[in-house]
Image: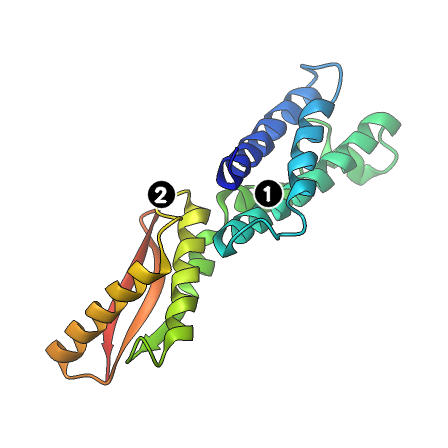
Amino acid sequence: MTVDEELSQLEESIRRLKIEYDVYFGGGAKKPPADTVWRVEQILKKYSDGHKMNFAQRFRYSTLQQKYALFNGLWQQKLKIKEEGYRRPQDAKLGIAGMRVEEHEEAAEALAGKGEEEVKAFKTAVSDVNEGHADVERLFNAMMAAKSKAGEAGGNASFDSFKQFVAKKTEQIRKDYGCHAVEYSVEMENGAVRLKAKAKI
C-alpha cells in the first residue's frame, strides 16, 4: 500500500471513528470503538517521523493528525464523564450524546479542513523562473499541498513540468502586459484549487 493510500485509509478511519463514537455515546453500542482507535494510531505512529513522505503528504498527515487530536480530546472527556457520572453542572450541559456548541463548531471546522483561508495565504511574484527557482518551488509545494488537502488528483505532478508551465505563463503575461513580474497565488474557488496569475507592474 502506498503512502497516499494509507493516508486515505487514515482519513476514512478517522471519519468512521467519529461515527462509531457517536453511536457509542448515543447508547447504540456497548463498548467504545477500540479496534478503530488502534488502526488510526498505528498509521499515525508509522508516519510520525515524516521521512517516508514528500511535502504534500506531510502536510496532509499533519492535518489529519491535528483533526484526530482534536476529536480524541473531546472523546476522552466524554468517556470520563460517562464512566464517572456528572460531578459538575458543566458536565450535565456537555451531555453524553453531544458536545458543547463551541466545541461542535470547532470540530466541524477541523473536519472541513478550514482550507480556504490557509490556501489563499500563499502568493509569490516571479520574473525569471531560473533566478526565482526557490519561489517557484515554494509555489509548487503550496499547490500540491492544497490539492492534497482538498482531495484533488494531481498531487504527484512533477516539479519540472510545473516549472516549464510557469516559465511559459510568465513569459506570455510579461509580453502581453509589458510588466516586470507575474504574481501567482494558490486559491480555493468553489471547492477546487486554482493557480491564478496576474501582471505585477
Q: Earlier in the sequence, mark 1 or mark 2?
A: 1
**Is residue 33 at all visible to an observer of this figure?**
no
Name the secondary structure under disc 1.
helix
Q: Position of residue 130 (x, y in %)?
A: 33, 77
**In the figure, is residue 157 to the left or right of 168?**
right
Q: Quadrant of the C terminus?
A: bottom left
Front position in the image: 148 or 137: 137
Name the secondary structure under disc 2.
loop
Instruction: Give, as a three-letter code, the residue at label 2.
Output: Ala
Occupied quadrant, residue 24: top right
Q: Position of residue 147 (x, y in %)?
A: 39, 50
CA neighbours of label 1 inside 10 A, class few (<14), some (14 to 19), many (20+): some
User: Does residue 106 lie above or below 164 as drawn?
Assistant: above
User: Of tags 1 and 2, which is closer to the observer?
Assistant: 2
Front position in the image: 49 or 184: 49
The residue lying at 23 percent from left, 85 percent from top is 180
The residue lying at 46 percent from left, 48 percent from top is 149
Occupied quadrant, residue 84: top right
The residue lying at 61 percent from left, 40 percent from top is 104
Q: Position of residue 54 (x, y in %)?
A: 51, 53
Instruction: Give, as a three-letter code, the residue at label 1.
Output: Ala
In the picture, the disc for residue 107 is: 1
**Is residue 17 at all visible to an observer of this figure?**
yes
In the picture, the disc for residue 153 is: 2
The residue lying at 84 percent from left, 31 percent from top is 86
**In the figure, is residue 73 to the left or right of 199?**
right
Q: Position of residue 92 (x, y in %)?
A: 78, 33
In the picture, the disc for residue 16 is: none
